[in-house]
Image (cartoon, helix red, strand yellow):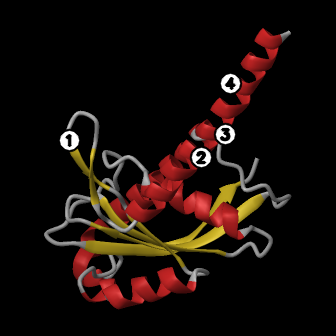
Amino acid sequence: MKFKTILSTIFIVSIIFGNSGCKEKNENKAKLADGEKIETVDNEKIEIISVFNYDNPKELSEYNALNLDATHPNLLNPQISSSDYDSVIKSWTELHQRIGAYLSENGFNWEVEDKTISIVHKIYFKSNGEIENYFFKVLNENVTKEKKKQFANLISEFPKDIRIEFENDGSFAQCGKTKYIND
């Protein structure tokens, strides 16, 4: 009987410590979601995508302070990509398909009854097509703040090797409205 009580106590204590450890990791992710470089276990430095939620006043202020539009011209501006319009549209569409697949692979669910989730976003890219900053506004009013934050955390961890299949001489941006199917 004492043995079962000891095992039960150890199990409960391990759950409590396990949960606090997860909380600490999630808080660290939130702190790193501003473009800082982090060091991985194999000492490789990776950069987290900076993500800004329009509905979060602090993030909106941080985004506005960066003035990214001054340094990242819009990709569909005819002065940038007039001859590449079709490839820009194709690469933009493929990127959003990969984002949708990434969300599914990570078990993300919006937890609303809407059949689609509409998001207006502006994505800022490095010249090689790698995502640098991601600004978004979820248009579905019944999506919770928690789900928007979870979405932002997943986007901040979006693999750096998944990029838009378009390169440019300098940094660039693309904006648009996307509908993701909500299973």
State the SS at label 2.
helix
**First reached walking from the N terminus: tag 1 or tag 3:** 3
**First reached walking from the N terminus: tag 4 or tag 3:** 4
Which residue is nearer to you in this view: 136 or 21?
21
Measure the alpha-carbon separation of dots 4 and 2.
15 Å
Q: Check disc 1 and report the residue beneath it.
A: 44
**First reached walking from the N terminus: tag 1 or tag 2:** 2
Which mark's residue is nearer the viewer, 1 or 2? 2
- Residue 143 in the image, given as x and y percentages of width and height: 75, 67
Q: Check disc 4 and report the residue beneath it.
A: 10
**Residue lying at 67% horizontally and 39% vertically, measured from the top left:** 16
Tell me which amino acid carries mark 4. Ile
- Residue 175 in the image, given as x and y percentages of width and height: 45, 75
The answer to whether the residue labelled 2 contacts the one labelled 3, judged by CB atoms less than 8 Å apart, is yes
> Horizontally, is 155 left or right of 103 in the view?
left
Crowd around label 3: few <14 · some 14–19 · many ≥20 (10 Å)? few
Tell me which amino acid carries mark 1. Glu
Residue 104 lies in what quarter of the image? top right
**First reached walking from the N terminus: tag 4 or tag 2:** 4
- Residue 161 in the image, given as x and y percentages of width and height: 31, 45
Q: Check disc 2 and report the residue beneath it.
A: 20
